[in-house]
Each structure stands twice: as structure tokens, then as C-alpha cells.
């Protein structure tokens, strides 16, 4: 009997070891396949930080111009990071097929942040020091951006990012980081766009808000929404707000509270998974009115939430009614079988902006930075982009407001925050 | 609104009751808190998901298959993780360690198979809400409440009126004497684990349906079942049901009036209060454990 027990124990231990290692191999396999485009993803050792900051700027040498992508490829936010990377690569392939920039080919060097701050800092340092990139396509995630921002001051490589939290662009004293740029509307702007729509188009007077109180993304969008409401001078106001945290999964009681307060519009700036439950439970407790959501209700939200997604209004960087967007989506789908989301086009636009800039000023990273700061009126697929040199945010960048009707997204209007 | 709140609370409470009874059943027989129960719920909820997504079956067959699989997982767990400890009459501590290990094992399986993302649970009801005039109730609440009530009534009936139920109760009172009386103790323990697993599976699938999305973290809700059985009295089935319904109602009302941020604070305060003034719970009898 004792033997049997021991055998079982050994088997158990062996099995759990296999299970653990199995898990690991899977992730490392993923890493390899998904970053095939770059052989430099594997970080050999901790990068050495140069003692004296390089003040001459990084100029790529050789016959390619290198652009870095600092994205989460294998971590929790990998769906976002991989899409940006794919869009950037798509644009680079197009540009190279048309002969490249100034007679040189573009090359994308992706380094994986794994969604982890420490990994991201290592990856950024490698891009800025070893890889000799002319510019970096930054992450769409605020906590990574916040970690990189102070460090970016030491180098001379511009980071064209997408984290909508404006704290990524300015330090505590409100001084703009010289290398950090944002290439989609900030959370203040996005919140304002949604508030503007609620007032102007839905004629809402009583708004109910449901949002996650432990998530800076939700809070930022709520702040932007509220400040637009108060500055607009409209009589629309938030009559009731309910907050939830990461551990909450049942929203029906909270939604009932909003209904009880007589909300004619519900504002829900949250992540997609939460939005699915919120939409479903809102309909289940009998709320039939409009629900305003952020970028997270862009496709595939409607197909995931089913009938509950009707009368959901959301903002997006792109619209499929734009022929060029539709064309790329179709082509990308045919090539890879995957759907190109809005993040894909953010990456796409930024690479094209960089290509234009490099054509004009060359591949020196400082010259690129200076040119990006003065960017005006670039007509991209995500809107007409001008950078405000004061705060490095896009100025007057419009977003496309969509409504979901019978499971289909219909573009209604274009709005900017101003 | 008040009636809707009440119904919501009852529905949530009924799912907690399923968790808590599964928990209490094992506690009453082997005198330990089975911490692998949450992971078993997750595992079975995913079984329900894949069965439903793969076959397109309606709710009842999906529930039955999930419960059977949940029961089998329970049997497997008892055989692998607890049988030897019971046979050797080892200290309760080993059950505790073993159940945590088993839970981690189940969780790892789920994570390996499904990864860290979320799954959208299939929708079983054509209409999410039932309107009666101006009055609206959630279809899922009604269905959950109804099915849970039926299952719990059957459970109580089995425990009170059948030979198997008497055997279960006898083993829970005094395992050695029950054995001397000719009761097959291990068979009885296996049955308890099967029932506990089936109840856990039912709770898992319900939580998937009610929350519309499913992640590998679903099992964390086992804490609610644990709190409910503490309030009700560890090991007492009727106490667990009572504690769970109370907890469900309390949570719903607290979320409505003070918000979700403070609701857990209040819930835990109430649990601590119970541990202070009535550590044996509502239904528990203050009997000294025999040495």
C-alpha cells in the first residue's frame, strides 16, 4: 500500500511538471511564430543603459531604415499590440513594394513588452540603443507608456504612441516629454466626443454612468465626459453613477439603480468583456434606451453581444464605409484570415506618417521628432491628424460615431472634441 | 423595483446555495473545507460551454451533461487527492493541502486549454427579459432560481428519506460507528463527492449564463459559497442554503444602496460578526468535536 501511495505521488508530481512545462513551451512557441519578422525579439541579457545620454540622435546606417515597434505580442494585451504591429507591417510592405523611402527599404523591428512594465523598459532600451531605429511605434496601453515616458527623455528617439492617458505625454509639472506623441484622441477628447453626441444627437437630459473605479482608462473617459457636460452649458447631467471593480461580474442591480434614477442614456466606458455583460444585463433588466460606449464596442463586440448590442453607440478611429479602409480589411482578411481592427489602422497611419516625414527630413531621429511635432493636416485613414506642438496630442482629430442596428454597425457622424 | 431586487437577490442566492451545499456536503463528511471546489466549478462551466457550443443543445441537456461531468470530476478528485488520507486517518491539515493542490491542478488544466481570454457564454433564452405589464424580470434569474430550488429540494429529500441519504448522514455523524454498522464508508464518501461535484457544475454553468462571459477566474466565486456556509454553519446543508440566500439578498441590496465598492466590506464584516457571536453559524449545533 505504501508503494502504491508513493507511485501515485511520483506520478502526480511528474504530471504536474509536464503540465507546467507544457504551458511554457506553448507561450515560447507563440513568441517565436508571432515575431518571425524580427530575429531580435529574444532578449539576450539585461541591456546596459548608457551612462551619458546620446545627444547626437540615432541615425540608421546601412541600406534599410529601421522603425521600432514596442508592442505587447505575447502578454495580456497582445490582441492590441499584435494588431498595431500587423498594421505597421502592412504599411511597410506597401511602401517597400512601391520602392521604399529615399531609395531605402523600411524595416520593422518589433520588441515584445509582454504587457509587463519591466520587460517593456528593457525592450525600449534595446530599441533606443542597440537597434538604431529612427522612431518607435509606441504601445496603446497607459501603464507601459507611463513607464517609458520619463526614460524616453534620455534618448533621442520619438515614440509615436496610442495610450490615451495624457499623463503619458506630460510629467507631473505639466512639462511635455520631448519624445512622447499621441496619435489618437486622448481620453479627455474621447469622453468629450461621447458627451457631445449624447447632448446634441440624443438630446439626453438624464445620463446614467456605469464604470470601473479601479481602472484609469474608465476613469479618464468619465472625466472627459463630465468636463464636457459642465463646460457645454447644457442642462444634461449625470443623474446617477455606479462604480464597479474588477471582481464584479453581476451588473444587473447596478443597472437597475440607473434605471431607477430615470436615466435616458447610459454611458459605459469599459473594456469589451465587461461591456458584453453590461449590454446583456441592461436589456435583461428592461433598459431599452441607448448605451454609449468607447472604442471597446467596435467590432467584434456586436457579434459577441448579439441582440443586446442593438442601440449601442460607440466611437471608432475608423469607419468601414471609407473605401480604402474596407479594401485593406478585405485584403488583410484574405491574406491572414484575421479581421483588421481599429488598432491595425493606427499602426498603418503612423508608419505612413513616418514615411512621409523621412522623405522630407531624412532618417535622423531628432529631425523626425521635430517634424512630427509640426505635423499638420495629414490625411490618414484614422482621420485628419495635426499634432499640437504644446502637448503632443492630436488637435481636432475626429472620431467616427457608430450605432449598432440589428447587429450591424452604421456610421452616423464624425465628431471632434472641439 | 423592490420585487425585482428581491428576485435578483434570490437568484444570486440560489446559485450561492448550490456552491455552499456542495461545500457543506464534503465538510460534513470529511470535516474539511474543499478548496478545489471553485476550480471544479470553472472546469465544469467550460465543459458546459464546449458542449453547448459544439452541439447547440438547449439548456437542460447541457446542464445534465455538465452535472454528470462535474460529478465524475468530484469522484476523480476524491480518489486521487483524498482517499489515501481518509484511509490513514491522517490529520485534517493534509486534506486542506491536498484540496488546494487539486484546485491548482484543475485551474492549470483550464488555463492550458482555454488561455487567459474570455469566452462569451451561449445564450439559452430567446428573450433576456420577461415583461408583465410594466414589470420586468430577468429570464435567467427565474430559470436559475427555479432549477436551483428543484435541485436543492431533491437533495434534501435524498438526504432525509432514502437509504443512501441516511448512510451519508450516518457517516457524517460518526464514520467509525457507521462502518461498524455495515455501511460502506468509501462508497458513501464517493457518492458525496459525486453530488458535490454535480452541484458545483450546476453552479458553474449558471454563473456562466448569468454573467454572459466566462473566464478561468470563475472559480473565485467559491468564496461566496464559503462565506455562506460559515454564516449558515459549516457542514449543515440547510444552514448553507439559508446562509447563501441571505448572502445573495444582502449583497444585492447592499450593491443597490451603498455600491459595489463597499458591499464586500459589509459582507465580510457580517461574516466576522457571525464568527464572533455565533461561530457555529445559524443552523450549527455547538457540539464539541470528538477527539
Image: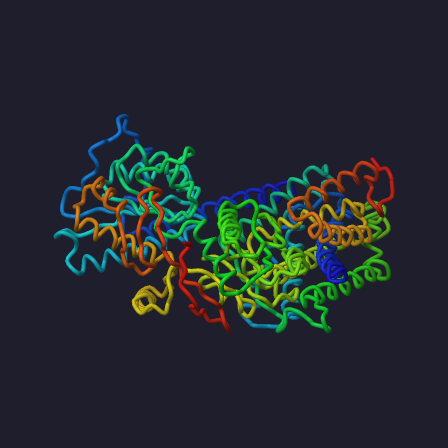
Asked whether the viewer can see residue A142, the reply is yes
User: What is the total number of numbered labels drawn onto the structure image?
Assistant: 0
> In this view, which residue lies farthest toward the top?
A51
A47 lies above or below B189: above
Placement of the C terminus of chain B among the 4 image quadrants: top right
Which sits in the foreground, A246 or B177?
A246
Q: Is residue B21 left or right of residue A89?
A: right
Residue B99 picture location, percent across and down: 65, 44
Which sits in the foreground, B151 or A398?
A398
Q: Is residue B136 left or right of residue A283?
A: right
Residue A137 picture location, percent across and down: 31, 47
Residue found at x 54% / y 64%: A203
Placement of the N terminus of chain B among the 4 image quadrants: bottom right
Asked whether the viewer can see residue A26, the reply is no
Residue B206 picture location, percent across and down: 65, 61
Q: Picture quarter containing residue A344?
A: bottom left
Q: Is residue A283 left or right of residue A182?
A: right
Q: Picture quarter containing residue A93?
A: bottom left
Which sits in the foreground, A252 or B111?
A252
Q: Is residue B222 left or right of residue B187?
A: left
Residue found at x 80% / y 62%: B153
> In this view, which residue lies farthest toward the front?
A233
Residue A14 picture location, percent across and down: 51, 44
Which sits in the foreground, B101 or B190?
B101
Amino acid at each position: 500500500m505504501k508503494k502504491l501511495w508513493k507511485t501515485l505521488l511520483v506520478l502526480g508530481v511528474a504530471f504536474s511538471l509536464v503540465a507546467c512545462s507544457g504551458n511554457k513551451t506553448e507561450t515560447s512557441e507563440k513568441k517565436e511564430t508571432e515575431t518571425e519578422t524580427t530575429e531580435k525579439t529574444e532578449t539576450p541579457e539585461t541591456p546596459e543603459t548608457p551612462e551619458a545620454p546620446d545627444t547626437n540622435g540615432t541615425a540608421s546606417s546601412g541600406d534599410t531604415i529601421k522603425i521600432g515597434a514596442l508592442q505587447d505580442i505575447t502578454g495580456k494585451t497582445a490582441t492590441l499590440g499584435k494588431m498595431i504591429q500587423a498594421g505597421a507591417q502592412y504599411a511597410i510592405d506597401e511602401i517597400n513594394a512601391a520602392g521604399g523611402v529615399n531609395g531605402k527599404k523600411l524595416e520593422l523591428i518589433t520588441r515584445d513588452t509582454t504587457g509587463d512594465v519591466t520587460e517593456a523598459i528593457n525592450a525600449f532600451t534595446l530599441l533606443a540603443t542597440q537597434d538604431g531605429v529612427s522612431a518607435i511605434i509606441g504601445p496603446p496601453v497607459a501603464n507601459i507608456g507611463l513607464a517609458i515616458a520619463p526614460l524616453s527623455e534620455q534618448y533621442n528617439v520619438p515614440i509615436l504612441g496610442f495610450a490615451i492617458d495624457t499623463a503619458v505625454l506630460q510629467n507631473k509639472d505639466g512639462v511635455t516629454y520631448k519624445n512622447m506623441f499621441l496619435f489618437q484622441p486622448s481620453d479627455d477628447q474621447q469622453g468629450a466626443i461621447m458627451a457631445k453626441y449624447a447632448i446634441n444627437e440624443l438630446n439626453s437630459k438624464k445620463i446614467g454612468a456605469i464604470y470601473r473605479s479601479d481602472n484609469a482608462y474608465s476613469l479618464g473617459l468619465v472625466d472627459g465626459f463630465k468636463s464636457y457636460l459642465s463646460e457645454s452649458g447644457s442642462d444634461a447631467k449625470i443623474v446617477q453613477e455606479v462604480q464597479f471593480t474588477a471582481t464584479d461580474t453581476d451588473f444587473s442591480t447596478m443597472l437597475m439603480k440607473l434605471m431607477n434614477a430615470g436615466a435616458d442614456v447610459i454611458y459605459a466606458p469599459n473594456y469589451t468583456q465587461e461591456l458584453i455583460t453590461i449590454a446583456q444585463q441592461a436589456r435583461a433588466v428592461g433598459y431599452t434606451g441607448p448605451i454609449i460606449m468607447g472604442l471597446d464596442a467596435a467590432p467584434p463586440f456586436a457579434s459577441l453581444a448579439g441582440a443586446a448590442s442593438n442601440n449601442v453607440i460607440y466611437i471608432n478611429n475608423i469607419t468601414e464605409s471609407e473605401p480604402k479602409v474596407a479594401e485593406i480589411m478585405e485584403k488583410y482578411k484574405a491574406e491572414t484570415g484575421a479581421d483588421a481592427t481599429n488598432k491595425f489602422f493606427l499602426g498603418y497611419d503612423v508608419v505612413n506618417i513616418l514615411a512621409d516625414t523621412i522623405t522630407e527630413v531624412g532618417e535622423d531621429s531628432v529631425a523626425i521628432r521635430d517634424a512630427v511635432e509640426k505635423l499638420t493636416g495629414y490625411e490618414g485613414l484614422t482621420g485628419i491628424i495635426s499634432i499640437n506642438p504644446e502637448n503632443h496630442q492630436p488637435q481636432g482629430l475626429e472620431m467616427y460615431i457608430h450605432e449598432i442596428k440589428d447587429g450591424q454597425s452604421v456610421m452616423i457622424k464624425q465628431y471632434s472634441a472641439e | 423595483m423592490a420585487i425585482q431586487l428581491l428576485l435578483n437577490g434570490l437568484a444570486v442566492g440560489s446559485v450561492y446555495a448550490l456552491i455552499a451545499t456542495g461545500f457543506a456536503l464534503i465538510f460534513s463528511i470529511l470535516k474539511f473545507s474543499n478548496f478545489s471546489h471553485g476550480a471544479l466549478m470553472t472546469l465544469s462551466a467550460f465543459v458546459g460551454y464546449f458542449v453547448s457550443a459544439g452541439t447547440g443543445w438547449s439548456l437542460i441537456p447541457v446542464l445534465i451533461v455538465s452535472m454528470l461531468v462535474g460529478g465524475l470530476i468530484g469522484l476523480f478528485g476524491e480518489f486521487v487527492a483524498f482517499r489515501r488520507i481518509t484511509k490513514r486517518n491522517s490529520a485534517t491539515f493534509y486534506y486542506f493541502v491536498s484540496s488546494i493542490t487539486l484546485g491548482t491542478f484543475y485551474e492549470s488544466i483550464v488555463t492550458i486549454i482555454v488561455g487567459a481570454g474570455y469566452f462569451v457564454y451561449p445564450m439559452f433564452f430567446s428573450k433576456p427579459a420577461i415583461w408583465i405589464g410594466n414589470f420586468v424580470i430577468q429570464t435567467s434569474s427565474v430559470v436559475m432560481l427555479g432549477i436551483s430550488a428543484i435541485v436543492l429540494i431533491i437533495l434534501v429529500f435524498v438526504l432525509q428519506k432514502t437509504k443512501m441519504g441516511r448512510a451519508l448522514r450516518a457517516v457524517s455523524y460518526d464514520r467509525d460507528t457507521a462502518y461498524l454498522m455495515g455501511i460502506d464508508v468509501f462508497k458513501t464518501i464517493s457518492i458525496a463527492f459525486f453530488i458535490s461535484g454535480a452541484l458545483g457544475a450546476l453552479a458553474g454553468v449558471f454563473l456562466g449564463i448569468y454573467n454572459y462571459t466566462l473566464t478561468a477566474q470563475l472559480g473565485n466565486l467559491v468564496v461566496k459559497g464559503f462565506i455562506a456556509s460559515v454564516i449558515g454553519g459549516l457542514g449543515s446543508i440547510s444552514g448553507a442554503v439559508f446562509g447563501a440566500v441571505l448572502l445573495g439578498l444582502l449583497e444585492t441590496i447592499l450593491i443597490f444602496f451603498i455600491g459595489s465598492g463597499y458591499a464586500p466590506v459589509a459582507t465580510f464584516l457580517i461574516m466576522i460578526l457571525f464568527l464572533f457571536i455565533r461561530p457555529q453559524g445559524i443552523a450549527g449545533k455547538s457540539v464539541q468535536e470528538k477527539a
